[in-house]
Image (tube, rainbow, N blue to C red):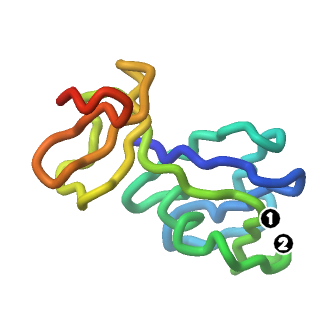
Amino acid sequence: MTMRMLNINNNAVVNAAAGPTDIGTAQARRYYSCAAGAFVDVPGFATGDAAQISSSATRTSGDTPGSLSVTGLFTVGSSGATSSRPGNPSLRDLHVDTTLSAVVVFDGASWRNPLTGAVV
C-alpha cells in the first residue's frame, strides 16, 4: 500500500533512506517529487518510505547519510486498491481508493464516500 502526499509548495523533494531503518548513502536514496498542487504516491505505508516521510514531514535536514529531507509535503492518507485499505483504521482515516477513483473516509465502523455518505 502507498501513501498519497500533496505538494503544498514548489520545494517538495524527499530524499528517503534505503529502507525504513537502514539510512544508507546518498546513492542508495530514493527521491520523490511533484509539481505544486500535485500528488505523489509513496510506497511503504506502514513501515517503508511513506511511514518514514509521514513521521518526519515537518523536519528538514540536509542530504547527508543518516538524514531525511522533507519539504512541502502534506500526508493525505493511504492509497491503493479497495482491497488494500488499512486493516485497523482509526476514525476519520482517509484512503485514496484507486479502484473507485475516490477518497473514502472511515467512520468508525465502515468506509464511506464523504460526498454521498454511502458505504463503499
At horizontal 65% and vertical 40% (from top left) the residue drawn is: 40
Q: Position of residue 48 (x, y in %)?
A: 47, 58
Quarter of the N terminus within the rendering:
top left
Quarter of the image where one finds residue 70 = bottom right
Residue shown at the point (36%, 19%) measured from the top left: 99
**Residue closest to the far right:** 10
Name the residue located 23 percent from the left edge and 55 percent from the top edge.
Answer: 89
Under mark 1, the amino acid is Ala
Q: Is residue 40 left or right of residue 46?
A: right
- The quadrant of the picture occupied by the C terminus is top left
Numbered badge on residue 26: 1
State yes or no: discs 1 and 2 in contact (Cβ < 8 Å): yes
Q: Residues within 10 Å of mark 1 (few under 14, many from 20)?
A: some
Q: Residue 118 location, x and y as percent?
A: 21, 27
Above or below, 117 relative to 20: above
As drawn, is 99 to the left or to the right of 31?
left
Residue on which disc 2 sits: 63
- Mark 1 or 2 closer to N-term? 1
Q: Nearer the viewer, mark 1 or mark 2?
A: 2
